[in-house]
């Protein structure tokens, strides 16, 4: 297969395909992760090793990227459920294969092109142009050599150029666009019977004690205390390493000079403000009225008819400062909001701003005093600077310390004492931890999985280093174990009742839904099917497109409707699905209409064509990568990944 592909993509097109494939895999360089020592191997690609340290660093970098880009809090368990570490390993493997392919084909980027790109990076400029000293210093700060960085730039330039070329070369026919429009804009005639879970629950008889005891006996494995372990563990983070970091007086003195340089020349402004608050859903009239009110107040203050303090007492919605004349005291950049900072930066002593909008509402700002920031002596900030320096040193030391923890705990698997002494961190004790839950260190799924690993549980060996967060690892060993034990009915009666009721409701709803579905399939009138059932309602059929869910047609029901096989002409199709709130739905699909390509304008057609081109490129990339993997000798050590 790979030979066939290579024959078909000779020349510039081969460059292009390799480039597009490589973009997702080139977010970091390979060379910076290569190290010696006892770093275990997690995979081999044609005899070339990928080490645990390389994988861990790439994983940490990807994880940090996702955390920075996400609007929600991401946990170690989420990353584990995503299989993120395995994804990162696959990307490293693919990168190795692509680099090898490029070398075989003799692809190069000229040195002058690499130099031009680097000279154009503003971070390396000083006095208006590229500065070699600045360039080398910035790379050193990132722990990267000039050679590594230039190799990365060379690869990126090759891949970016080829990526653009492939996108520009994709070809999509008009029939393909029409086919996609017909599918994308398809509409379906769907009605549904909705079975209300709460009403079904109310209609069921209450179980007696005999029912519950019988259910408890039948499901005894559900109502038991699970097998559990107690763990000894060493937890490593930069914060835990910070206390042991030695900071020299020279380093402290240098940090103080940097601190003085940041502080000197800074202005501290004392500020008053008047705030008219606005709700998030304020309409344009309210917004304009608040602004005009502050404009009038400003005119009154500037003319001398009233003082700022008087207008603050009269107008301001800031109850914490209103009675103090709107006084906020000293305000520094970032204290309130970006637009507030921008207005404040332009004001001198005694000046009043125009109305300024922030997320809180409209502000009128007055600077009534400006003072130079006083730089405290070294002794006053010694503790703060030492804490920062120790934290910085600990973050730099983390990977070496984590590697030593992993190495020593592996080489001496019968005790955590040698590892504790090697890195200067204590051995701690957990509470009881099961396979599914635990407190403290046991709340992490990776810890629980490791604790019940055969070698850790049965042989009582130390675990491998478990990554449970960014720069956060732990090694555990089992100190105590207790088997699963059935719990008596009296102790779990409430849980038994809850589970019995849940199962009874699900069974009743399932039987009702299947009975109604069978009636619809037999051609019965839907309104008659629900006539004698108070818990069920018929929602008349309507035409829907994808994404047109509403109160009558919940999104889960609409998704299920578009997943159904269209019925034959003059027939209907049915299906059963469950809504997010637990209600059961019986769907009745009675018609399908294809989307109409003639309704697309030229711009929409072009957008559709670009989408198809991207899909074609993705399929080609996937085929190419499968071929590379098939011909390569790739060996993944699964146990070493976890």
Image (cartoon, helix red, strand yellow):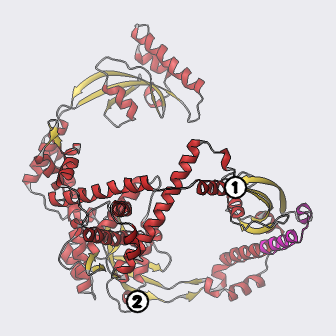
Q: Quadrant of residue 452?
A: bottom left
Q: Which residues are magenta?
A: 509-530
* Residue 520: percent from left, percent from top: 86, 68
* Residue 353: percent from left, percent from top: 38, 20
* Residue 586: percent from left, percent from top: 78, 66
Determine if the magenta segment contains residue 376.
Answer: no
Residue at image position (69%, 62%) is 562
- Give the camera-side residue of 160 and 66: 160
Circle number at residue 186: 1
Q: Residues within 10 Å of mark 2 (few under 14, many from 20)?
A: few
- Give the camera-side residue of 603 and 560: 603
Q: Could one spot residue 383 in this view of the protein? A: no
**What secondary structure is marked by label 2?**
helix
* Residue 270: percent from left, percent from top: 31, 26
Mark before the other along the chain sequence, 2 or 1: 1
Circle number at residue 454: 2
Residue at image position (43%, 28%) is 321
- Residue, far bottom: 459
């Amino acid at each position: 297969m790979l030979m066939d592909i290579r024959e078909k993509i000779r020349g510039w097109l081969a460059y292009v395909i390799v480039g597009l494939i490589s973009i997702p895999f080139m977010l970091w360089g390979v060379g910076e992760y290569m190290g010696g020592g006892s770093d275990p191997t997690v995979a081999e690609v044609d005899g070339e090793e990928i080490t645990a340290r390389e994988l861990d660093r790439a994983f940490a970098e990807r994880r940090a990227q996702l955390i920075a880009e996400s609007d929600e809090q991401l946990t170690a368990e989420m990353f584990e459920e995503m299989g993120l570490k395995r994804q990162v390993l696959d990307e490293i493997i693919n990168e190795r294969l692509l680099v090898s392919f490029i070398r075989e084909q003799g692809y190069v980027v000229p040195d002058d092109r690499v130099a031009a790109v680097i000279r154009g990076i503003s971070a390396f400029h000083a006095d208006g142009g590229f500065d070699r000293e600045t360039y080398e210093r910035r790379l050193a700060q990132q722990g990267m050599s000039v050679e590594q960085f230039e190799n990365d730039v060379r690869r990126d330039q090759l891949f970016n150029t080829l990526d653009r070329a492939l996108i520009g070369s994709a070809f999509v026919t008009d029939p393909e666009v029409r086919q996609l429009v017909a599918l994308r804009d398809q509409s379906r005639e769907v009605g549904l019977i909705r079975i209300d879970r709460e009403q079904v629950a109310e209609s069921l008889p209450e179980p007696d004690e005999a029912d519950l005891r019988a259910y408890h006996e039948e499901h005894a494995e559900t109502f038991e205390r699970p097998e559990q372990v107690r763990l000894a563990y060493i937890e490593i983070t930069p914060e835990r390493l910070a206390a042991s970091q030695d900071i020299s007086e020279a380093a402290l003195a240098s940090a103080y000079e940097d601190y003085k340089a940041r502080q000197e020349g800074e202005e501290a402004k004392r500020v008053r403000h008047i705030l008219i608050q606005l709700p998030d859903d304020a309409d344009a009239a309210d917004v304009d009225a608040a602004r005009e009110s502050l404009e009038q107040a400003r005119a009154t203050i500037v003319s001398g008819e009233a003082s700022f303090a008087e207008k603050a007492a009269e107008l301001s919605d800031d109850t914490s400062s209103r009675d103090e004349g709107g006084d906020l005291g000293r305000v520094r950049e970032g204290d309130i909001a970006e637009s507030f900072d921008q207005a404040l930066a332009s004001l001198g002593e005694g000046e009043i701003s125009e109305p300024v909008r922030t997320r809180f509402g409209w502000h009128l700002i007055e600077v009534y005093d400006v003072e130079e920031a006083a730089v405290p002596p070294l002794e006053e900030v010694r503790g703060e600077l030492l804490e920062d320096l120790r934290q910085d040193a600990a973050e730099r030391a983390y990977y070496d310390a984590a590697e030593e923890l992993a190495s020593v705990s592996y080489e001496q698997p019968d005790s955590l004492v040698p590892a504790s002494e090697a890195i200067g961190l204590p051995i701690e004790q957990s509470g009881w931890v099961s396979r599914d839950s635990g407190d403290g260190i046991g709340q992490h799924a990776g810890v629980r999985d490791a604790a019940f690993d055969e070698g850790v549980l049965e042989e009582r060996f130390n675990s491998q280093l478990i990554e449970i967060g960014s720069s956060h690892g732990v090694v555990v060993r089992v100190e105590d174990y207790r088997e699963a034990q059935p719990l008596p009915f009296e102790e779990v009666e409430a849980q038994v009742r809850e589970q019995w009721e849940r199962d009874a409701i699900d069974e009743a709803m399932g039987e009702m839904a299947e009975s109604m579905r069978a009636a619809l399939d037999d051609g019965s009138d839907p309104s008659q099917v629900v006539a004698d059932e108070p818990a069920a309602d018929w929602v008349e059929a309507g035409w829907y497109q994808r994404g047109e869910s509403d109160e009558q047609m919940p999104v889960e029901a609409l998704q299920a409707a578009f997943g159904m096989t269209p019925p034959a002409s003059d027939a209907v199709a049915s299906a059963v699905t469950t809504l997010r709130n637990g209600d059961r739905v019986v769907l009745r699909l009675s018609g399908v209409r294809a989307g109409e390509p003639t309704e697309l304008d030229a711009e929409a057609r072009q957008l559709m064509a670009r989408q198809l081109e991207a899909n074609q490129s993705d399929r080609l990339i996937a085929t190419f990568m499968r071929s590379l993997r098939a011909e390569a000798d790739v060996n993944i050590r699964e146990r070493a990944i976890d």
